Image (tube, grey):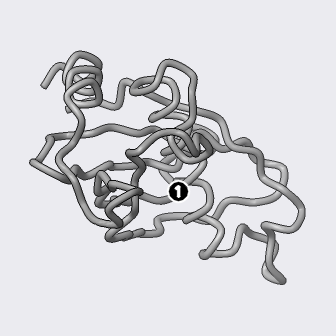
């Protein structure tokens, strides 16, 4: 399965540690930014799921895994590729490749859970989200 979605992420001066490369904890922020872009572009047609207080459905991250392959330095450009390989009933994984200069710097995966804000509990993935992801990913 290929990555059909990519987004650019800015490397900020504050991201770099004393070794001259992006600190490992910052990669979680990079995949977060990519996740928000993917969901905004693919699922909600430009609207963000996280800032819409009127929506009853949001998301929570239940799990985050990152594997590091090479360092990213301050002046390098970073692209994060995102894909959803499958959908469950209330959750789905999102897979990531953090790329710089044509090489994979890190890979990662999050487990995303659809969340009912009013109930404060997991809920089934909304049909419109399911339809949008399925169409985009070709699932």
Left or right for 22, reference 120: right
Check disc 1 and report its element: helix, strand or loop.
Answer: strand
Left or right for 96, reference 22: left
Expressed as whole percent of the image width and height from the top left, the position of residue 22 reads 71, 67
Left or right for 28, reference 128: right
Left or right for 3, reference 79: left
Q: Residue at the location (57% across, 27% down)?
A: 47
Q: Residue furthest bottom?
A: 18
Expressed as whole percent of the image width and height from the top left, the position of residue 122 reads 24, 61
- Front residue of this view, candidates 87 and 7: 87
Q: Residue at the location (39% across, 27% down)?
A: 43
Question: Quarter holding the N terminus?
Answer: top left
Expressed as whole percent of the image width and height from the top left, the position of residue 69 reads 47, 65
The residue tagged 1 is: 105
Q: Residues within 10 Å of mark 1 (few under 14, many from 20)?
A: many
**54 relative to 116, above or below:** above
Q: Residue at the location (52% across, 53% down)?
A: 31
**81 relative to 91, above or below:** above
């Amino acid at each position: 399965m290929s990555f059909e979605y990519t987004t650019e992420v800015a490397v900020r001066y504050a991201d770099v540690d004393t070794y001259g490369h992006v600190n490992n904890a910052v990669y979680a922020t990079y995949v977060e930014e990519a996740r928000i872009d993917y969901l905004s572009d693919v699922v909600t047609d430009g609207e963000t799921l996280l800032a819409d207080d009127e929506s009853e459905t949001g998301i929570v991250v239940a799990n985050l895994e990152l594997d590091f392959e090479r360092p990213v330095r301050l002046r390098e450009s970073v692209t994060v590729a995102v894909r959803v390989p499958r959908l469950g009933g209330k959750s789905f994984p999102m897979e990531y490749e953090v790329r710089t200069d044509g090489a994979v710097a890190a890979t990662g995966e999050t487990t995303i859970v659809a969340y009912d804000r009013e109930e404060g509990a997991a809920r089934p993935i909304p049909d419109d989200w399911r339809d949008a992801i399925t169409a985009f990913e070709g699932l």
